[in-house]
Amino acid sequence: ILWQNVEYPDSLSELGISGKTIVQFIVEIDGTISNVKIAKSSGQRLFDNEAQRVIKLLSGLFIPAQVNGRPVRSY
């Protein structure tokens, strides 16, 4: 699902620029996502913004972690 929604910035693609962005977020007890942050930047703001946008699209699709059979928030 992630790669189907990523829109690689054309301006960077034309220049042959690539990078990796690491995103941190919380999966809430209902499977939604909150506190989306860049844990490690690619050095390109466009990549970082796109990574955050795509992660936010996944809100509600996650199965929350469980402790003793009860859903809990998790990173």
Image (cartoon, rainbow, N blue to C red):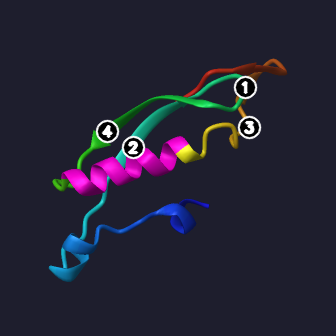
Contact, mark 4 vs mark 3 (Cβ under 8 Å): no
Contact, mark 4 vs mark 2 (Cβ under 8 Å): yes
Q: Which residue is mark 1?
A: 30
Q: Residue at x 20, y 50 (%)?
A: 45
Q: Secondary structure at mark 3?
A: loop
Give the number of the mark in front: 3 or 1: 1
Q: Position of residue 39 (x, y in %)?
A: 31, 39
Which amino acid type corresponds to the residue marked 3 in the rendered image? Ile
Q: Which residue is mark 2?
A: 23
Q: Residue at x 46, y 63 (%)?
A: 6
First in sequence: mark 2 vs mark 1: 2
Res 72 → quadrant = top right
Camera-side residue of 25 and 70: 25
* Horizontal side of residue 41 vs 54, given as left or right: left
Camera-side residue of 65 and 60: 60
Q: Position of residue 57 (x, y in %)?
A: 56, 46
Which amino acid type corresponds to the residue marked 2 in the rendered image? Val
- The mark found on residue 39 in the picture is 4
In the image, which residues are magenta? Answer: 45-56
Q: Is 55 inside the magenta-drawn segment?
A: yes
